[in-house]
Amino acid sequence: MNIFIILGMGAAVGFLSGMFGVGGGFLITPLLIFYNIPPVVAVATGANQVVASSISGAITHFRRGTLDLKLGTVLLVGGLSGATVGIWIFSLLRALGQLDLFISLLYVIFLGTVGGLMLLESINAMRRAARNEPTAPRKPGHQHWVHKLPLKVRFKKSKIFLSVIPIVALGFAIGILTSVMGVGGGFIMVPAMIYLLRIPTNVVVGTSLYQIIFVTAYTTIVQAATNFSVDIVLAFILMVAGVIGAQYGVRVGQKLRGEQLRALLGLLVLAVGLRLAIALVVTPADIYSVVMGTGN
């Protein structure tokens, strides 16, 4: 592999991680697959790179007071549980020989759905802003169904009073995705926290990165111990570039409005999903491939 291409990938994904508040795994894993890295290695190693980018971005948000540690810890409880289940699913699919296809199909479905919804919503928001149309106020006493659930806890940093049930459930789902797809899950967690849980946007990014750090670190360690699928040299190169890129991404992200960030992220997610979909249906140049390796 060309080390400069790998460095470029890591820096670009780190930059986007800091800008959008996502771990970047939904980008680095497909990019590694496009560069002919086996999906098994791409998933586990991509999760490792996500840790570095997320730490860099989360520290910056913590210093600026845009990270809710209490909310992030509740998300983390569900995330670690989901990651454990996800690693079991990953090992099962690998044993059945269907892991590569399953990973690609999951990416196409999730990226296409999430990217399309985010792009549509952000375009509508920008149109309303251009016409100076205020957002319709919520009727007095009207509550979203999520806010009617029991076991409510007050999160002072986020200024919300919310049940821990949907928060833990969201973390659990993200944990499974982290293990199976090698993603931090920010591309789903950030929209869910904003639109479903109604958490203020300025706190969402840093809190998302905080949860991603520990879930992806746990996933990487367990993947290395159980599936032996982490390439430490590749991971180190990606980590170094990702940390540097994330710092610049945070600075750029704070200069853009929320709807602009969501529109850019939506376009990016759709582009990656489209590229993976094309790869699934187009006949490859070489129908058969031979993999050389050594066994113990």
Image (spheres, helix red, strand yellow):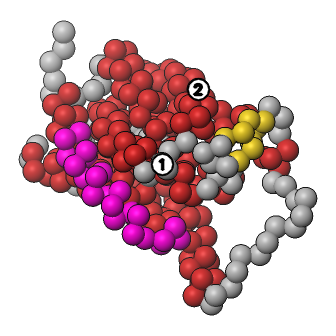
| Left or right of 206 on screen, residue 73 | right
Residues packed near mark 1 inside 10 Å, few (<14), some (14 to 19) or many (20 plus): few
Q: Quadrant of the N terminus?
A: top left
Residues packed near mark 2 inside 10 Å, few (<14), some (14 to 19) or many (20 plus): some
Per the image, the residue denoted by label 1 is: 65
- Give the residues drawn in magenta, as a range: 239-260
Query: Of circles 1 and 2, which is in front?
Result: 1
State the CA–CA distance, disc 1 to disc 2. 22 Å
| Left or right of 160 on screen, residue 9 | left
Say which residue appears at 74% left-offset and 35% top-offset: 153
Residue 82 shows up from this direction: no
Q: Secondary structure at mark 1?
A: loop
| Residue 130 spot, x, y in % from top left | 57, 88
Above or below, 140 against 156 in this view is below
**In the image, what residue type sits under mark 2?**
Val
* Quadrant of res 120: bottom right
| Residue 58 spot, x, y in % from top left | 40, 43
Q: Residue furthest top?
A: 296
Per the image, the residue denoted by label 2 is: 77
**In the image, what residue type sits under mark 1?**
Gly
Q: Quadrant of the C terminus?
A: top left
Query: Do the numbered discs 1 and 2 sit on residues whose CB atoms are within 8 Å?
Result: no
- Magenta span: helix, strand or loop, mainly? helix
Above or below, 147 against 211 in this view is below
